Image: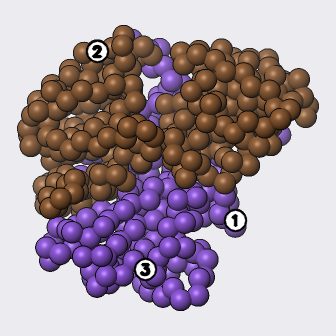
Chain colours: A brown, B purple
């Protein structure tokens, strides 16, 4: 079995966030699989085949890439951000578990990348500077009740919350419901950050508070960070404010 | 005010994980500040001054770098992993908030990086493939009771838990106590990953379960990931098993 599958994180979009390992892995593959918008970011190399697919077809895409690799090819599957965070690495592992025994013997490598919450946090200051959670708001793959239970547990215990997949065309109300949910546990003055298309054209960072967060527009390219009761906003003249969560947590909870 | 401070994430250690942005930012600075072990990773450039400090002096180091930048210099402060995750960016923001007004007007940039949990997860499969928390086990900066409350909230709500700073010479018992704490809520078969010195000499990944996790040695270079009830181990002949958390959560909670 000489097949190889490399699952590559491209980072949030800016080429300056593509690691040298990811760059080399893209160049080394004979075939590239991925959601078409991510595949478009990989430089074209002669002799390398490209297999774009639609955004919602993660499991089929993972199986197709594994089947191709099992034929002895060196295949790469690209992911935005980090492939292990709400992305393709879990789909590949699930396909391996459910697939033919030969898939378990493939040479599988996962190349980490800068995930979206790190890029948004870097633009805003250090909102994830202390204990935090990352949670996908998509209720396509889990019941909404479980999402609310997790939001409550996280906000109640003082975790900052990074919200992936806050909104889509088919999920218009979930982000507002999430703000209502954490708003029952956190003060209205809690900082909230909207980061949109960070590292890409049209990048936007908006710093607001929980009491007005529902009035801010978000879309599929947005990542939202909800602070804890300890997260602070530092005003700066002529610049966006800094948002950070102190490394020490004694004050609010001692 | 022409001073500039760039807070740079070097990634977990392997130079192939240093982003092009971080590489360029290291080269552009006139002065480099950082914990000496991280500073040693930055290539030496003639004319660039270096200001190493001890591991435990984050707040003093942040203030020194800000004061230097406020004199008009272009200063870089280096961090391992991502500077926003249990690292220097929060210390810098706190120093700015507490410091002289001029520090708020500095040109501050934060350069994200690959944080340790992403590198460990990539080596293991996709343990962070669904909702997860990141938590520092250091009780230097928060009471132990708060750490236990957060572990219980996270494990009880089905988050995977990435544990930073699990052990130090001054904190020998905390990791065992954390396993006991989550063990009251999770089955003994829950997967646990120990990732040590990932991307550096002596890298080790160990996959075990919660029932025996207390017998595994860990140190300051270790990051621990505790799965949820849904995290799965996929055996592979002649290779370490894959560990992943499925993207969908309906099964265990519907």
- The residue under the point 65% across, 62% down is B14
- Nearer to the camera, A28 or A141: A28
Residue A210: image location, x then y, percent: 14, 36
Residue sitting at x 70%, y 26%: A33
Location of the C terminus of chain A (image quadrant): bottom left
Residue at mark 3: B33
Whether residue B38 can be seen here: no
The reply to the same-chain question for discs 2 and 3 is no
In this image, A54 relative to B5: left or right? Answer: right
Q: Residues within 10 Å of mark 3 (few under 14, many from 20)?
A: many
Q: Residues within 10 Å of mark 2 (few under 14, many from 20)?
A: few
Q: Which residue is mark 1?
A: B202
Q: CA distance from mark 3 to mark 1?
A: 27 Å
Q: Residues within 10 Å of mark 1 (few under 14, many from 20)?
A: few
Residue at the (26%, 30%) spot, across then down: A151
Residue B23: x and y in percent read 57, 65
């Amino acid at each position: 079995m000489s097949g190889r599958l490399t699952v590559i994180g491209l980072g949030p979009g800016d080429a300056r966030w593509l690691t040298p390992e990811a760059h080399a892995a893209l160049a080394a593959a004979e075939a590239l699989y991925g959601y078409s918008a991510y595949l478009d970011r990989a430089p074209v190399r002669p002799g390398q085949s490209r297999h774009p697919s639609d955004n919602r077809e993660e499991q089929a895409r993972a199986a197709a890439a594994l089947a191709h690799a099992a034929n002895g090819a060196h295949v790469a599957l690209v992911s935005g951000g980090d492939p292990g965070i709400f992305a393709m690495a879990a789909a590949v592992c699930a396909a391996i578990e459910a697939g033919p025994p030969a898939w378990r013997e493939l040479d599988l490598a996962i190349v980490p990348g800068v995930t979206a919450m790190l890029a948004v946090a870097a633009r805003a200051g250090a909102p994830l500077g202390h204990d935090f959670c990352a949670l996908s708001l998509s209720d396509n793959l889990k019941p909404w009740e479980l999402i609310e239970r997790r939001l409550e547990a996280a906000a109640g215990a003082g975790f900052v919350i990074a919200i992936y997949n806050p909104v889509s065309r088919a999920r218009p109300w979930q982000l507002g419901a999430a703000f209502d949910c954490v708003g029952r546990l956190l003060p209205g003055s809690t900082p909230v950050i909207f980061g949109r298309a960070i590292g890409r054209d049209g990048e936007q960072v908006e710093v607001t508070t929980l009491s007005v967060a529902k009035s801010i527009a978000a879309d599929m390219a947005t990542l939202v960070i909800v602070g804890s009761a300890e997260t602070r906003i530092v005003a700066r003249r002529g610049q966006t404010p800094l948002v950070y969560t102190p490394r020490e947590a004694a004050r609010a909870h001692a």
